[in-house]
Image (spheres, rainbow, N blue to C red):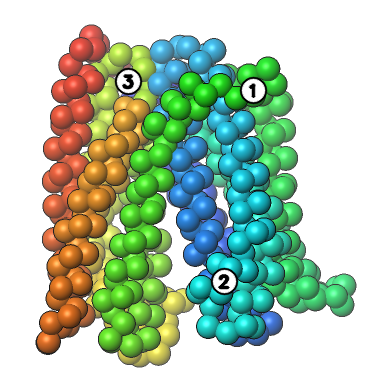
Amino acid sequence: MKDLTQGSIVSHILNMAPPIVAGMVTIMICQLVDLYFVAGVSEAAVAGVSAAGNLAFLINGLMQVLGVGTVALISQAVGRKDRADANLVYNQSLGLAAVCGLLTWVAVSVFASAYMRTVAADEATVAAGTTYLLWFVPALVLQFATQVMGAALRGTGIVRPTMIVQISVVMINIALAPVLISGWGTGRPLGVAGAGLASSIAMLFAVLMLWMYFRRLERYVGVDFAQLRPQLRHWQRILNVGLPAGGEFAIIFVWMGVIYYALRDFGAVAQAGFGIGTRVLGLIQMPALAVALAAGPIAGQNFGAGNAARVKETFAKAALIATVVMIAITILAQWRPGLLLTGFESDPQTTAVAVLFLQMVSLNLVAQGFNFVCSSMFQGLGNTKPVLWSSAFRLITYALPVLWLSARPGFRIEYVWYVSNLTTMLQAVLSVWLLHLEFKKRLTPLRSVLPAA
């Protein structure tokens, strides 16, 4: 356990952010590995695995429910020096993860084929996507456990073990993918089934590595089989904090759908350019997002300790660092957007759409940084409902104008990005205002103490 209620807040953020970035990058690489090797099977295999990935995105939203609830409650318990409650939350989260994992396995096994028929263009794609999902679902189930374990560590101020495990997962997946998908060394190619199996085996190793870490090295929280029994009151505590975060994922899913719908008349080139631009944007935003994620447990521990001054200082320092990072990225995106697209180049028209997207949307990166930091601060304070409200506000103020404009004559693709920039800035203003209200509500009653020298 690392005490985040003492010492320099900036130092805590800068120490925690790099491992978080590394972990997020490895997750993205892991998602690309399967597609890379599946590309040698068939176009239907690539389409099937890609379509199946959309379902995985929605399930990740459910995982976020557990992760956010766990890190918020454990960080607050650490700040209160309440080790018993931290252990209880950890074990209840593991039990809830087991239930969610089991329900996911049953649901995917029953509905995989039906889901693929709603999104796939032909029977070959349906078959490939269904096969991949059935072999990939163990990985999804195991991820619920790794999500809770990683969140528990982050709540106690520890992030490096999770990073090491995530990198190990990528290495195992990269080693297994060509063997299982293409049959390297075995002469028995499994195709898309091998892609799902490689991910599932790699995730099994992740669970085992984290389990061994908790058994041998972690001393603050650990598995207590007596506390794994469901206690609905504590499940409710976890879900009250985590469910709005899952709702935010659903809103993002709808928001992306609105954009693809609005771009439909511009053809596949526009949609492909947006897809590439979005992937690059997600990649370059990771440093600021990592800063925000580091701020959450710092705020949570200090809130649990009753130190209002350090909670406010955490927001101020995290927002400042995120702003500096986002300004640097904005300058790069305006100056050399093509450099950011290295490795993602497609045909000239698609690349032109991606360049336009990056140049225009990068103008709201500072505002997006504030959204990231505010979201993490709400997690630390244990109330994520304002995050859902601000995200819903952005969806409504974005979707209605864009859908209306897309039906008007003379509609141009730039209008989509203009509205996106405006609504992101409005969301940032709303988020900061809601956080100000939350500070007044939750921090005013606390007896603030001066930060330690």
In the structure shown, which secondary structural element does the residue marked by tag 3 occupy? helix
Q: Nearer the viewer, mark 1 or mark 3?
A: 1
- For the residues labelled 3 and 2, the Cα–Cα distance comes to 45 Å
From the viewer's perspective, is residue 117 above or below residue 373?
below
Relative side of 49 to 206, left or right: left
Instruction: Between residue 349 and residue 452, name the one nearer to us.
Output: 349
Which tag, 2 or 1, sits closer to the chain's start?
Answer: 2
Residue 89: percent from the left, percent from the top? Answer: 52, 23
Note whether residue 252 is visible. yes
Asked if the residue at tag 3 contacts the one at tag 1, i.e. Cβ–Cβ closer than 8 Å, the answer is: no
Instruction: Between residue 283 and residue 244, name the one nearer to us.
Output: 244
Q: Which residue is mark 3?
A: 303
> At label 2, which amino acid type do we have?
Met
Relative side of 15 to 179, left or right: left
Q: Which mark is residue 116?
A: 2
Q: Which mark is residue 229?
A: 1
